[in-house]
Structures are given as structure tokens and as C-alpha cells.
Image (cartoon, rainbow, N blue to C red):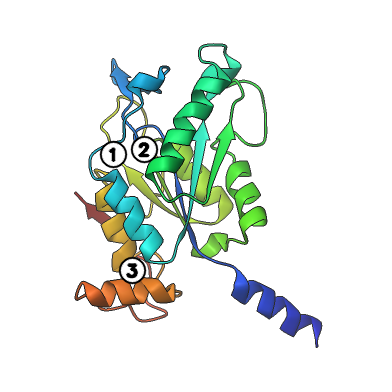
């Protein structure tokens, strides 16, 4: 077997994924003076409306699902690592996730995993066999979108109207995760490669699969 053919087969085995930020995307966060804060108590950790069904729709469509979350409160001593682990156990029990990637470091630690760096996405891609070029990053902060772009993914910004600078160059904007999932399943972000299960899911809902080669476009969903 030639080297080029072997590389092609390895590439063909890579799978698309949806990378999900945690706070403000999957679960509620506290917003103080326009800035979001992660929950620090397990009893305050609650999924947002429609999240469970939206994530299951992505899984049914054939995507790998990876949470990529900055949790600097651990490094800053504001929440115990065990508490965050319990929150993630709750996520795994409620959602069909393939992995949770966590950066526990302080904001100024200079690590390679904290978003906006793409370290968590690339680490998951190596371990799970993910094609980053065929994947999507969904987040509610500029750092999420920057990390997705640096990794080579398409990106969807969930606009929570925080009082902070928004991202530059997001491929789509939505107001919630269910709205973002509708954009993903519609095929407007990544039209060149569809998981077979996603095609079947689209047909079941009366949607047409997009033609290969059609360009990605800016989309806004509510």
C-alpha cells in the first residue's frame, strides 16, 4: 500500500465533532454586571432549557460530542476540583458526551490548554480521531470562537448579550444551543461532509442534505 493511500484511509476514518463550551451553553451561569460566572456549588449546576434534546439530536446525527471548558476557579482556589468533577458526572449522566476537556489553570498561568488557545480541542482530536476541519465549536465567549478558529473548526457564537467584547469572525450566531444545533443540522456551516446518520436525521425531518462544495455562509438563528 502506498503512503498516500494509507494517509487517505486514516483521514477517511476521522470523524466530525461538535465542541461545546460549558457555562452559558449547556448550563446556567450567574451574570453579574453583564459578566458571566460559573456555578461554584453543585446545587446551582442546572442545564439550560432544551439542552438535553439538542445534544441528543447531535449524537443521533453522528457527531462526536466534546465539552471544552475553562475552569480557572479551580486554580484560583474558589471551587474544589472535586466539586467540578461532580458537576461533570452530572453532565455525563444527562448528556451523551464522548469527552470532557478541562483547563483548571489560572487565567495568567500561560498554559496551552486554556481557551482561546486550541489545546483542549487538539488533545481531544488526537485521542478520539476527530477531523477538526469537519467539526464545529459552539460557545458564548470570544475565547471559545478564537479557540475553534485556531483549531481549524467552524464556529457558532451563542450571543447572551454579555457586557464584553464579542468574537471576531464567527461563522454563525445563535441565541441558544437548540438554535445552534438547528444551524448545524441544516448543513450551512460544513456542507462538504455529512455523517450518514445526520443525512438520515435530516431526511426524517423533511430537510435536504446540502450539495457538496456549496460555501459556508453567515447564519443567524434564534
Residue drawn at x 67%, y 79% is: 9
Q: Where residue 88 sits in the image (x, y, percent)?
A: 48, 34
- 85 shown above or below 196: above
Q: Where residue 216 sits in the image (x, y, percent)?
A: 37, 66
Residue drawn at x 57%, y 52% is: 151
Residue 218 can be seen in this image: no
Per the image, the residue denoted by label 2 is 140
* Nearer to us in this view, 44 or 13: 44
Instruction: Find the distance from the CA under tag 1 to the CA under tag 3.
Output: 20 Å
Q: Quadrant of the N terminus?
A: bottom right
**Relative horizontal placement of residue 139, taking residue 148 as reference (left or right):** left
- 99 shown above or below 208: above
Tell me the SS state at disc 2: loop
Tell me, yes or no, whether the two marked residues, 2 and 1, touch with CB atoms within 8 Å.
yes
Q: Where residue 209 sits in the image (x, y, percent)?
A: 31, 78
Instruction: Find the distance from the CA under tag 2 to the CA under tag 1.
Output: 6 Å
The label number, if any, that marks residue 181 in the structure image: none
Q: Quadrant of residue 213?
A: bottom left
Amino acid at each position: 500500500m502506498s503512503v498516500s493511500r494509507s494517509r487517505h484511509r486514516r483521514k477517511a476514518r476521522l470523524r466530525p465533532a461538535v465542541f461545546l463550551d460549558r457555562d452559558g451553553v449547556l448550563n446556567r451561569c450567574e451574570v453579574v454586571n453583564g459578566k458571566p460566572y460559573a456555578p461554584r456549588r453543585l446545587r446551582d449546576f442546572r442545564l439550560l432549557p432544551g439542552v438535553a434534546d439538542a445534544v441528543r439530536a447531535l449524537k443521533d446525527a453522528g457527531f462526536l460530542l466534546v465539552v471544552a471548558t475553562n475552569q480557572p476557579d479551580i486554580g484560583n482556589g474558589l471551587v474544589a476540583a472535586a466539586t467540578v468533577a461532580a458537576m461533570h458526572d452530572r453532565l455525563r449522566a444527562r448528556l451523551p458526551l464522548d469527552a470532557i476537556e478541562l483547563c483548571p489553570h489560572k487565567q495568567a498561568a500561560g498554559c496551552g490548554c486554556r481557551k482561546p488557545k486550541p489545546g483542549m480541542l487538539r488533545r481531544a482530536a488526537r485521542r478520539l480521531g476527530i477531523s477538526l476541519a469537519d467539526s464545529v465549536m459552539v460557545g458564548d465567549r470570544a475565547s471559545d470562537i478564537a479557540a475553534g478558529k485556531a483549531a481549524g473548526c467552524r464556529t457558532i457564537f451563542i450571543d447572551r448579550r454579555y457586557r464584553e467584547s464579542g468574537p471576531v469572525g464567527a461563522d454563525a450566531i445563535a441565541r441558544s444551543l437548540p438554535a445552534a444545533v438547528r444551524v448545524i443540522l441544516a448543513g450551512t456551516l460544513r456542507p462538504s461532509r455529512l455523517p450518514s446518520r445526520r443525512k438520515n436525521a435530516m431526511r426524517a425531518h423533511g430537510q435536504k442534505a446540502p450539495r457538496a462544495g456549496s460555501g459556508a455562509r453567515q447564519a443567524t438563528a434564534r
